[in-house]
Every structure is written in C-alpha cells, then in structure tokens.
Image (cartoon, grey):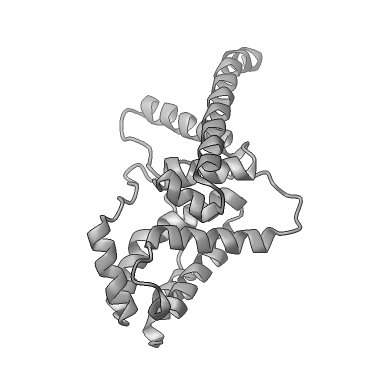
C-alpha cells in the first residue's frame, strides 16, 4: 500500500474539531450525496491505488463520518480517534474492496462497528449535548433570527440525543446521512422492515420531545423573569 494513502488521515489528527464538524459556522453546508456513477469511478481508481481518489473520498465523506460517530458517542476525542481509524482501514483495504462496494454504507458500517467495539460492555447510552448543532448550518439573517435558529437546532440535537442507541443511529443514517433505509439496515445489521420501524419510532419520539420543549419554554421564561 502506498504510504501516501495514510496521509489524509494522519493530517486529520492535527486539525480542530470544527474542521470536521461545523459547530457554529452559519455558512456550513451539508455534504451532497455522490452520484452512483462518480462513486463507482472513485472506487475503481481507489482499488487501482490512485491516491487522488482516496483524497477525494476522504474530503467528501470525512465530515459525515465524524458527525455520525460524534452524535452516537458524544465524545469529541473518541469520535476523532474512531473516524481516523475508519480512514486508515479504508487505506489498508482499498485494493481488496469488491468492485460493487458502495462506499457510503461501507464507511458507516466500519464506523459503527468500531464504535460498538469501543463501547461494548459500557452502560453509557446517553449522549452529552456539548453545544452540538446540525451540520446543515444556521441560516444567516438578523441577530434575532440567528438566535432563534440556534435554539431550534440545539433543541433538535437534544431530542436526538435523548433517543436510545438503536433509534438514534437509524434516524442519523437515514434522515441526516441520507442513506436509503435498505442501506442503513445493512449498516446496522437488521432487516429493512426493522430499520423502518426504528426510524418511525425515532421520528415520533423526536417530535414528542420537541413539543414538550416548546410547551416548557413559556413557563421557563416566566419563572426566570
């Protein structure tokens, strides 16, 4: 394996967390989905040892891989370590990948397996909010609109963080990372129907949590005045 394959992941270790996951940047956009034809071309070049293909895959998917792991474990240092290991494994196994490998599900499967292995035996299931907001970014507007948007995103992250692990990963993979339910089921290792049921429950619970936060807001403000 060419040593330059490892360079992007090594370089990532020296970057700040905002380089991976835009916490408060108003212009932070979500990484678009790579079209199937481009993904197949990148995969073929990767299997042939083309380091520029690795760099392209890394630059496109690294924010998404980090964001998924971070939301699942709530620990930045651990998320950085595990997401870096995902890229090291891609570098090691690049030439052995099947021609029909789908990169996005492969990356999230590796990330999830690493996280499960790391946290196996731990009773810790809740995620610390730690000032996370959605990677889609906060829209630019008036100061009042910005504050309102920040509150909305923080509430949404709190609602997501309150989900059990199985519901949270289903929601993140489909609603945030834009995997098809069948792809998310493959990542998690369950039947598509089971994944869809988890997704439905996750959406319902997030909706209820947001409604509860909204109802609590006026009383909280009155008590503080």
Q: Which sits in the foreground, 163 or 149?
A: 163
Q: Which sits in the foreground, 25 or 36?
A: 36
Q: Residue 65's spot in the image, x, y percent?
A: 46, 58
Residue 57 in view in this figure: yes
Residue located at (48% from left, 52% from top): 67
Q: Residue 32's spot in the image, x, y percent?
A: 30, 50
Q: How many marks?
A: 0
Q: Is residue 126 above or below residue 49?
A: above
Q: Is residue 203 above or below residue 223?
A: below
Residue 157 in view in this figure: no
Q: Residue 180's spot in the image, x, y percent?
A: 40, 46
Q: Residue 215's spot in the image, x, y percent?
A: 58, 15
Please identify the quarter of the rendering in which residue 99 is found.
Answer: bottom left
Residue located at (35% from left, 42% from top): 26
Q: Is residue 68 above or below residue 89?
A: above
Please identify the quarter of the rendering in which residue 218 is found.
Answer: top right
Q: Residue furthest bottom?
A: 2
Which quarter of the figure is the C terminus placed in? top right
Q: On the rendered structure, is 55 left or right of 197?
A: left
Residue located at (44% from left, 47% from top): 182
Which quarter of the figure is the N terminus placed in? bottom left
Q: Is residue 204 above or below residue 169?
A: above
């Amino acid at each position: 394996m060419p040593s330059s394959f490892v360079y992007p992941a090594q370089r990532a270790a020296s970057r700040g967390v905002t380089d991976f996951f835009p916490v408060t940047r108003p212009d932070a956009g979500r990484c678009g989905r790579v079209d199937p034809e481009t993904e197949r071309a990148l995969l073929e070049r990767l299997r042939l040892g083309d380091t520029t293909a690795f760099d392209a895959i890394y630059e496109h998917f690294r924010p998404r891989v980090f964001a998924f792991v971070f939301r699942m474990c709530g620990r930045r240092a651990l998320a950085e370590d595990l997401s870096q290991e995902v890229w090291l494994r891609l570098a090691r196994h690049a030439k052995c990948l099947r021609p029909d490998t789908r990169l996005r599900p492969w990356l999230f499967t590796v990330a999830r397996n690493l996280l499960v292995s790391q946290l196996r035996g731990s009773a810790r299931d809740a995620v610390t909010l730690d000032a996370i907001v959605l990677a889609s970014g906060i829209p630019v507007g008036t100061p009042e609109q910005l504050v309102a948007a920040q509150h909305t995103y923080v509430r949404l992250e709190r609602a997501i963080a309150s989900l059990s692990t199985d519901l949270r990963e289903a929601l993140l993979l489909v609603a945030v990372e834009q995997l098809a339910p069948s792809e998310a089921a493959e990542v998690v290792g369950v039947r598509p129907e089971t994944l869809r049921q988890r997704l439905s429950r996750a959406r319902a619970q997030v909706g209820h949590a947001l409604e509860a936060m909204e109802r609590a807001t006026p009383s909280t403000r009155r008590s503080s005045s």
